[in-house]
Image: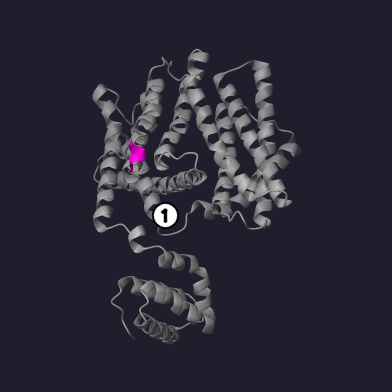
Amino acid sequence: MTTFADQPLEEQIAQWRAYVRRRQTIHGPDVEELEGHLRDQLVALTETGLTGDEAFLVAVKRMGSLDALSREFARAHSERLWKQLVIAPDATDESPNTSRAETLVVLILAVAAALAVKVPTLFGLRLSPNEELPPFYARNASLFVFPLLTVYFVWKRGSDVVRSLWLWLALPLAAGAVFANVFPFPKGSNTEVLTILHLPIALWIAVGFAYVRGRWFDDGGRMNFARFSGELAIYYVLIALGGGVLTGFTFMMFAAIGMNPDWFVAGWLIPCGAAGAVIIGSWLVEAKQSVIENMAPVLTRLFTPLFTVLLLAFLATMAWTGSPINVKRQVLIGFDLLLAVVVGLVLYAASARDPQAPPDFFDGLQLLLVVSALVVDGVALAAIAARISEFGFTPNRVAALGENLILLVNLAWTAWLYARFLRHWGSFAALERWQLAYLPVYSIWAALVVVVFPPLFGYR
């Protein structure tokens, strides 16, 4: 068979060959015969002056008219093939020097984030397996990483427009550093815990501004940042799982020679790895976007029915038993996270959907998920309101009340827009615009909790 000097073309042929071999009804000799036909087509097409990408696209199409398997391959890979044909290589492919430069920048920033975690040690704030985590580390966890992540996006997106935004990017990060450390929090105070939980949410919008080059009011930019956030969360979990395996082997291997690695694991491996993983995960998300489709929308398809069943089962059980919700801080945080996951499922489903496509079964399932979450939110709000009326206001209850109200508004309007879409009274684009327009609300509320709640409640 003819072998082509065009390496990308050979890689495309290899992908086609691997696809054919995965079909159990196609055996070795048949694969070779089909590949021979494909290569003959490619030779004829390239001799007419077509490029490798153009020839491969046409050859697979011609094969598809003769062979159902090739037709299936062409249908499954049509979007990627058209991207390779239409988009110029120099517009999408980074040069080796650019790729190496980005790798070097990412490694430097990841190491800087890891070392930033150790800077407080110079001032007596040590990380020890035998001591409680100093509150300073918890309050400033996002500040060890987010400024460096912002630098990465400014460097990667670098333009004159972004340079003019340096001040606007620095202001929220500097303000976060001030409000995280200026208040006289007593040890274990509720307002300090609220600051720890809400500061990363408030500062994430600064990272978003850097990501979209300051074009925050562009719906496409905000949607890309939402996709990035979901992908980063997935990658971070995967990296954390790998880090857990590494930690386990570290303990096992050093214990085998009578050494206790607690000081290294607690003082270096976990904190430094957790900080550096944010930079590495962001880089992986950026690198992967041009290669394969995002994972978040795929996982949305998987988890939407599961979370719908969970919420319906919870509501049915609560109605059957008459058991009220336990209004403790951990429970309230759990419910807020659950509702945030529902909002995320809606957002990532919207990010992967064609706005012009008609409603389908999955859209109805999404509406059921949103309505179930809306009922759960209403039940939680009723429990919080009853607790406040009986025992008064506390930082935790007011924070939970505000967050549940914010989520209630989002879910209620989302349900309305979904219902209109399913009845063909409105467009899906309206739902997408609503979700994107609502994103800053979460950061604004989180900033209020960080700035206003500590003095309002006497730092208790």
In magenta, the rendered stretch is 159-163
Residue in the foreground of this view, choosing between 190 and 201: 201
Q: Would residue 24 be seen by someone viewing this image from the given angle?
A: no
From the viewer's perspective, tell me whether residue 81 is left or right of residue 351.
Answer: left
Q: Would residue 36 be seen by someone viewing this image from the given angle?
A: yes
Residue 435 in the image: state x and y as whole percent: 58, 41
- Residue beneath the point at 61% across and 34% down: 407
Residue 145 is drawn in which quadrant? Answer: top left
On whether residue 105 falls in the magenta region, the answer is: no
Residue 318 in the image: state x and y as whole percent: 71, 37
Label 1, secondary structure: give it. Answer: loop
Residue 426 in the image: state x and y as whole percent: 69, 48
- Magenta highlight: main SS: helix
Residue 107 is drawn in which quadrant? Answer: top left
- Residue beneath the point at 49% across and 69% down: 78
- Residue beneath the point at 26% across and 29% down: 119
Indicate the colouring scheme. Answer: one colour
Residue in the foreground of this view, choosing between 373 and 427: 427
Residue in the foreground of this view, choosing between 15 and 188: 15
Residue 134 is drawn in which quadrant? Answer: top left
From the viewer's perspective, tell me whether residue 168 is left or right of residue 384.
Answer: left
Q: Residues within 10 Å of mark 1 (few under 14, many from 20)?
A: few
Q: Which residue is mark 1?
A: 289
Amino acid of disc 1: Gln
